[in-house]
Image (cartoon, rainbow, N blue to C red):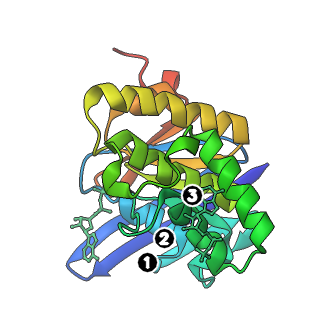
Amino acid sequence: DVSISLRNIRKDYDSQTEVLKDVSADVQTGEFFVIVGPSGCGKSTLLRMIAGLTPITDGDVLINDKVVNDLPPKARKLTMVFQNYALYPFQTVWDNVAFGLKARKLNQSDIQHRVDHALEMVNLTEFSKRKPRELSGGQRQRVALARAVASDAEICLMDEPLSNLDAQLRIKMRQEIYNLQRKLGLTLIYVTHDQVEAMTMADHIMVLNDQHVQQIGTPSDIYQHP
Ligand code: ADP
Ligand code: ADP
């Protein structure tokens, strides 16, 4: 059961900046799919094309077997977690998580239920009235995760979500994201430049390099020679 298909994707920002040449991949429903590769190889660009945040030069993105090239981000039924978390500094944790749901005009009790549930899932219930600046880095990261949980989207895109955390916290949050993905049965596409992260979390890994897909496989396919 394929959730996302990338078919012969090409991306040029302009004639001087050819970023990706011929990227194809299938992401199965419910899998943890990691895109790994050196800085600047186009990982973020690829994720943004799946989200509909930047246009594709050539090729197709399919979500649940439908070409979505011309669909705006909101119509794609996915949620994205950014590197910098993108929190509203003057709103409480609770309101940060509720924001997208209010924008979708869900009813009050539905919003209440979803936000409370999402905060519980990431162990932030007791911090719901705080502002982002009153939180640690890991807690801020959890607010961003709670947002994704509250959205109820089946597909989640994460762009280097742990890169602003110190090494110890990164390992802890890695485990939390892994557990969350499994518990919710999310189809998760996770971008990182960290091979260890890729290896410990992924069902499948896509290695991007030099504008191409170098390899797609399970962690043991890809990292069998230590
Ligand atoms: P990664 O996420 O792997 O670090 P990016 O997708 O951010 O890579 O960037 C890939 C390449 O595209 C880089 O050379 C970067 O400078 C270029 N690039 C990214 N965004 C833009 C943009 N909006 N306009 C022009 N070039 C860009
Ligand atoms: P508004 O739409 O005016 O923000 P809400 O009823 O959504 O009003 O929320 C009012 C305030 O109460 C918000 O600032 C929010 O931080 C807080 N709040 C609402 N529900 C909860 C909850 N379950 N737990 C903690 N704080 C909440």
Image point (27%, 29%), residue name: 167
Assess disc 3: are there few (<14), some (14-19) or many (≥20) residues with their C-alpha within 10 Å of its C-alpha: many
Image point (70%, 48%), residue name: 117
Please state if 198 lies on the left or on the right of 168 as rendered.
right
Q: Which residue is mark 2?
A: 49
Can residue 83 be seen here? The reply is no
Residues at marks 3 and 1 touching, judged by CB atoms closer than 8 Å: no
Residues at marks 1 and 2 touching, judged by CB atoms closer than 8 Å: yes
Q: Does mark 1 have its CB less than 8 Å from ligand 1? A: yes
Task: Name, please, the residue furthest toward the top.
Answer: 226
Q: Amino acid at mark 1?
A: Thr
Q: Position of residue 203 (x, y in %)?
A: 59, 33
Please state if 60 lies on the left or on the right of 131 as rendered.
right
Alpha carbons under labels 3 and 1: distance apart: 22 Å
Task: Name, please, the residue furthest toward the left.
Answer: 16
In the drawing, what numbered circle is on residue 147? 3
Q: Position of residue 123 (x, y in %)?
A: 56, 37
